[in-house]
Amino acid sequence: MKKNHPHEYSEIESSSNVPLAQELNFSVSTLSGGQESLLGKYETEGFPKVLLISFMAEWCPNCHYEAPILNGIYSAWHNSGFDMTIVAEYSDLDAWEDRFMRTHGINIPYFLGELNEKNETLRDNIAHTRIRKLMNDQRVWGVPLHILIVYGNLKEACFVTGEFKPGALEQFLK
């Protein structure tokens, strides 16, 4: 990870993009090696008041900056109708767990995305890239990327292409 890498703050934006709802429910890998739908648990058990889906990578400096903050927010708000899931993209499982989850003491549930390494050839064919394009995200790898779903309304999701501005997520949750 680069030292003194600049932050990449972004505003919370709204999306009324119907294809976003369809793209979000893609297949992710579980820690046990199985496959399941990203939103399957919520479709079965019901959505929380606010669901945050965060796409991150273990090599991403901005993800490292933001992870401890999000972990604190998750811990503080989890019993108040807020839930969160991380999708680890472009990251090897061992590196993700060692250099990211353990390093920051993260207790947020996570899945593995469709690519376990940076691969420019395959990148354009995965759900994360299709979702980014719907949000007009022009960044090369597009992490961190956050999607906020309120009361399960997939057609009116909010998103952040980069890090949350300080205090913005807490304000959104109030």
Image (cartoon, rainbow, N blue to C red):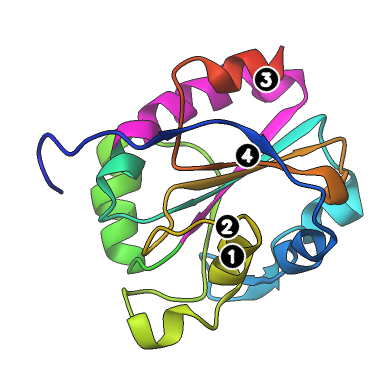
Check contact, mark 2 vs mark 4: CB within 8 A. no
Q: How crowded is mark 2: few (under 14 residues within 10 Å), some or many (20 or more)?
A: few
Dot 4 corresponds to which residue? 84
Percent across and percent down for residue 157 are 76, 44
Marks 3,1: beta carbons within 8 A: no
> Which residue is rendered at x = 54% and y = 69% of the image?
129
**Disc 3 marks which amino acid?**
Phe
- Give the quarter of the image for residue 18: bottom right
Between the residue at mark 2 and the residue at mark 1, the CA separation in whole angstroms equals 5 Å
| Magenta stretch: includes residue 53 | no
Q: Which of marks 2 and 4 is nearer the N terminus?
A: 4
Choose the circle earlier in sequence order: 4 or 3: 4
Task: Determine whether the residue tagged by mark 1 lies in a helix, strand or loop.
Answer: helix
Distance of label 3 from label 2 (alpha carbons): 22 Å
- Residue 93 lies, with reference to residue 13, above or below; the image says below
Which percent across, then down, holds residue 115? 44, 76
Classify mark 3: residues with Cα within 10 Å, few (<14), some (14-19) or many (20+): few
Whole-percent x, y for residue 57 in the image: 36, 56
Are discs 2 and 1 less than 8 Å apart at CB? yes
Disc 1 crowd, CA 10 A, few/some/many (<14, 14-19, 20+): some
Q: Name the residue under label 3.
A: 172
